[in-house]
Image (cartoon, rainbow, N blue to C red):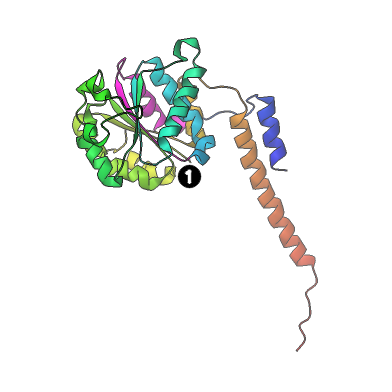
């Protein structure tokens, strides 16, 4: 009952359910404005700190963010605080560049700096001295010796930092250790997160003053962002999600009602001493 409508929506590939409007989801407009305001060729630090199991919830947002940065010829410095992040980052860059066609099929304007050791202390060190924390890229190149990273001496020298995570604790570490250095430099800290982590991360965005300058959360946020930049693909994903939620609620309601009716009309057993 649950799988059939979802599979049908994906196979048909047509959007029948109205997609989220950008103005209905706070944080998406601000996120979009920050990306669009980046100058051509700007160095951007991207943290791939999400687990692969959350790809279905976050991939639409992540793919569209990366493709927009590629269109602006941004230099992407890729990092991660989890061990699977560097490989995931490489995979997403290849996937995004191939989706843009021949002009971007071999996007080389990036450096995979790999894993950030040391947890919160590693992030603090990244804020003040990224060259010492990550001296070489994964292929052994000293990327700090050539433009544009030769002008970067602290995290505040990046034009923006984008953190992609499904873990509220990881998000808090980035906000607490990296955020103050970015605010002091007037640079943006942007987040792409999952629906599950959104309630714990959104207060940082809603704070006065805000500690995040943009937030895209879950599938709804990803669809709204894709719609804003004019890159919303009709692949049935949003319909499948909507159908899955609707059918799940109906299953719960019908099951609960059936349970009550059966309990009311089932004769009780006599308990003998």
Image point (38%, 18%), residue name? 108
Can see residue 107? yes
Where is residue 154 drawn, in percent x and y?
20, 31
The residue carrying pointer 1 sits among few (fewer than 14), some (14 to 19) or many (20 or more) residues within 10 Å by Cα, namely some
- Of residue 99 and residue 259, the one placed in the foreground of this image is 99
Image point (67%, 30%), residue name? 9
Residue 23 lies in the magenta stretch: yes
Bounds of the magenta span?
22-51
Can see residue 230? no
Residue 230 lies in the magenta stretch: no
- For label 1, the SS is loop
Q: Eyeballing the image, is 98 above or below 78? A: above
Q: Is residue 133 left or right of residue 17?
A: left
Where the C terminus falls, by quadrant? Answer: bottom right
Where is residue 232 drawn, in percent x and y?
53, 22
Quadrant in which residue 89 is drawn: top left
Where is residue 187 drawn, in percent x and y?
25, 29
Q: Which residue is mark 1?
A: 196
Q: Eyeballing the image, is 163 above or below 148? A: below
Where is residue 193 drawn, in percent x and y?
43, 38
Image point (48%, 41%), residue name? 195
Q: Eyeballing the image, is 236 above or below 242? A: above
- Of residue 137 and residue 241, the one placed in the foreground of this image is 137
For this orientation, the residue located farthest to the top is 103
Quadrant in which residue 17 is drawn: top right
For this orientation, the residue located farthest to the front is 140
């Amino acid at each position: 009952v649950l799988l059939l409508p979802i599979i049908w929506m994906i196979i048909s590939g047509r959007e029948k359910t109205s997609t989220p409007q950008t103005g209905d989801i706070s944080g998406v407009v601000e996120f979009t404005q920050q990306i669009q305001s980046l100058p051509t060729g700007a160095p951007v630090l991207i943290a791939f700190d999400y687990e692969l199991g959350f790809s279905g919830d976050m991939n639409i947002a992540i793919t569209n963010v990366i493709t927009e940065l590629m269109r602006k010829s941004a230099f992407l410095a890729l990092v991660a605080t989890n061990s699977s992040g560097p490989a995931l980052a490489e995979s997403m860059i290849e996937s995004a560049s191939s989706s843009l066609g021949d002009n971007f099929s071999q996007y080389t304007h990036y450096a995979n700096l790999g894993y950030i050791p040391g947890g919160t202390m590693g992030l603090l060190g990244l804020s003040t001295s990224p060259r010492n924390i990550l001296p070489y890229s994964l292929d052994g190149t000293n990327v700090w010796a050539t433009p544009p990273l030769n002008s970067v001496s602290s995290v505040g020298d990046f034009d923006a930092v984008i953190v992609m995570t499904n873990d509220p604790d990881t998000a808090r570490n980035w906000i607490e250790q990296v955020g103050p250095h970015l605010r002091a430099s007037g640079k943006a800290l942007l987040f792409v997160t999952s629906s599950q982590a959104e309630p714990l991360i959104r207060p940082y965005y809603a704070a006065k003053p805000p500690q995040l300058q943009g937030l895209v959360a879950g599938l709804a946020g990803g669809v709204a962002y894709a719609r804003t930049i004019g890159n919303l693909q009709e692949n049935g994903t949003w319909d499948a999600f909507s159908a899955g939620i609707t059918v799940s609620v109906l299953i719960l309601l019908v099951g609960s009602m059936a349970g009550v009716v059966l309990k009311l009309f089932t004769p009780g057993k006599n308990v003998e001493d």
